[in-house]
Image: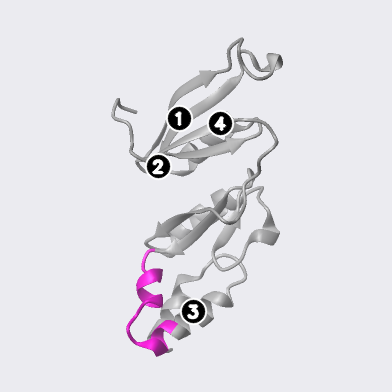
Amino acid sequence: MGNKIQKITTNLWFDSQAEEAAKFYTSVFNNSQIGRITRYGKESYESTLEGKVMTVEFQLEGQHFVALNGGPQFKFAEAISFIVHCEHQEELNYYWEKLSEGGDEKAQVCGWLKDKFGVSWQIIPGNLTEMICDPDPEKSERVMKALLQTKAKIDMESLQQAYDGL
């Protein structure tokens, strides 16, 4: 993973699934790898942790992450999510299917999903922001209306049709 430290790195706090999560995420994204794994030593906050995984460094599409096994006291919330920009429907379908597998189906709306670890993701068309921010308010409002009617995974063709006024 190289010696240069990324200026800002996302830290994900897991109860005890850091290594499992890092392996899962690196299996989903092509340009990905697992880096350094650290283990709890004798001086950890709990004696039963000695030798167990403490952190896993990994990369997804060049973005550095650290997964920490910190215990059950903190949980993921929808206030933070990762956005995956997709160029075509097949790509969107792929990420949706992989990341939603085993996740919370009730949390699936407007392209948002929660994975099996409780992490929130937005699987969206790469041009969604451009369509929503179009200077023509009729176009942008049609896209927003179509998006808000989406119950789970986004259909890129439906959004494009809304944008085009079809």
Residue 97: give x, y in percent of width and height.
56, 54
Front in this rendered view, residue 96 or 49:
49
**Is residue 104 rendered to the left or right of residue 123?**
right
Q: Earlier in the sequence, mark 1 or mark 4?
A: 1
Kind of residue at badge 2? Asn
Check if mark 1's residue and mark 2's residue have beta carbons within 8 Å: no
Q: Nearer the viewer, mark 4 or mark 3?
A: 4
The residue that label 3 is drawn on is 144
- Closer to us: mark 1 or mark 4? 4
Q: Which mark is residue 68?
A: 4
Say whether disc 1 or disc 2 marks the residue closer to the N-terminus. 2
Decide: few, some or many residues near mark 4? Use Cα within 10 Å; few <14, some 14-19, many ≥20. many
Q: CA distance from mark 2 to mark 4?
A: 22 Å
Alpha carbons under labels 4 and 3: distance apart: 37 Å
Check residue 139 for magenta coloring: yes
Decide which of tag 2 and tag 4 comes sooner along the chain: 2
| Mark before the other along the chain sequence, 2 or 3 | 2
CA distance for labels 1 and 3: 37 Å
Residue at the far top in the pictured view: 42
**Could you tell me which secondary element the residue under label 1 belongs to?**
strand
Q: Position of residue 128 (x, y in %)?
A: 40, 70
- 24 part of magenta stretch: no
Report which quarter residue 52 is drawn in.
top right
- Foreground mark, 2 or 3, reads 3
The amino acid on which the numbered mark 4 sits, given as a three-letter code, is Leu
Q: What residue span does the magenta drawing correspond to?
A: 126-140
Q: Position of residue 43 (x, y in %)?
A: 60, 12
Residue at 41 percent of width and 82 percent of height? 140
Q: What residue is shown with label 2?
A: 30
